[in-house]
Image (spheres, rainbow, N blue to C red):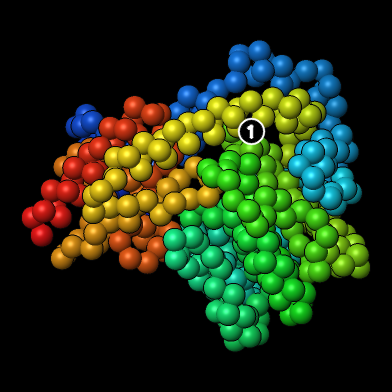
Amino acid sequence: MISHHRFSHRTDWQLAPNALARALADRRAVGGDVVDLTITNPTAVGFRYERSFYEGLLDASSAAYEPEPFGHAAAREAVESYYRARGCACDASAIWLTASTSEAFAQLLALLCDPGDAVLVPRPGYPLLEYLAALADVRLVSYPLRFDGEWFVDLDALRDIVGAEPRARAIVCTAPGNPTGAYLRESELAAIDALCAARGLALLVDEVFAEFPLRALSGRVRCAAGRRAALSFVLSGLSKLAALPQLKLGWGVLSGPPAAVSSARERLAVIADTSLSVSTPVQNALPRILRAAEPMRARITERTHSNLAALRAALAGGAASVLEPEAGWSAIVRLPQLAGLDDEGWALALLERTGTHVHPGALYDLEGCHVVVSLLAPAADLARGVAALAREVARRAAAA
């Protein structure tokens, strides 16, 4: 008799590859050339530290196992020093270490939500939280980001959504956004903090790209850690900050009303203690990693600035345009809406005709017709790919 296994409804995802994924696999299977403008893995595009840096990460100090739910004191103090150097009020007792910001989000969903509760997330945005929420049986409710030459939070819409959602437990802000690249305005953070405090919601701020500005702006929040009226959690980690995703270390910083912070710490300690996922070597090396990360960020910033300038130049005067980012590793390109060609159609046409691989805007719930380009790509790849994109847009626009 054949046994039919049952699986959790939480994992009932549509896993079949879409047309773009199939086309990419087919092209690579026959050795077709691909200019990949979707890569955001820094280790795959030339950002490596010197050999001596990696060789020194493991030493005899890692021989002992001393589990701490929030992480070793010296490592948390290194994170505190990083924030204080940025002018942000922070204390090591309010910091907890995780294997990644993804794990931090998963722990916060467990801390804040019961099954069926809701968390408000920005739209457009990166789709990772959809999977984490599904695994926690938590609903995601989107609130809109608008673009009028600059991205901003539609605060009136956010207030209406909170008012209509009795099981809301938290508001997530991604600052800078992915893929929007927009920092929170100071006025937006103040308004969202006040809304959360008034409604008893937690505020979760993912600022992994905060240290990668693309232009100078005033009135923007470069660091959300500090005094908040609402129970707040600010997340970051080595994946972006130090271009070291393979070392698997992230963190969160708590702030807010003392009684709420104290209760959250007690509960988080139990949640973190169930996995103790952060390795001893990376905690011991964290002070040195954070010191070495600043030159690496400068290298990445030099490339993203140069690539953004090249993207602007390639599209200047044409039918496509850049939605100017404020920070981060990506740029959104607005494409003409031609008959029978949405953003997924554009991405597929670019791959099949030119070998240029970009993300369709639909991946991020972008309205209208857009593709998203990684500014982390090697300069030669980006120049080649965006030149092909510009030619294809011009050809199709002329034929329309």
| Residue 391 drawn at (x, y percent) | 18, 42
Q: Amino acid at mark 1?
A: Ala
232 left or right of 399? right
Which residue is at a point 87% across and 67% down the rendered structure image?
257
Which residue is at a point 59% across and 75% down the rendered structure image?
155
275 left or right of 362? right
**Residue closest to the far left:** 399
Q: Residues within 10 Å of mark 1 (few under 14, many from 20)?
A: many
Residue 67 seen in the current view: no
Q: Nearer the viewer, residue 263 or 209?
A: 209
Instruction: State which quarter of the image contains the C terminus.
Output: bottom left
| Residue 109 drawn at (x, y percent) | 67, 64
Q: Nearer the viewer, residue 137 or 177?
A: 177
The image quadrant of residue 378 is top left
Q: How many marks?
A: 1
Residue 180 seen in the current view: yes
291 left or right of 207? right
The image quadrant of residue 308 is top left
| Residue 110 drawn at (x, y percent) | 70, 63
Which residue is at a point 63% across and 41% down the rendered structure image?
211
294 left or right of 365? right
Q: Which residue is mark 1?
A: 242
Secondary structure at badge 1 equals loop
Which residue is at a point 74% across and 74% down the rendered structure image?
194
Q: Is residue 51 above or below residue 176?
A: above
Instruction: State which quarter of the image contains the N terminus.
Output: bottom left
| Residue 186 drawn at (x, y percent) | 68, 61
Q: Nearer the viewer, residue 376 or 16?
A: 376
Q: Nearer the viewer, residue 375 or 11?
A: 375
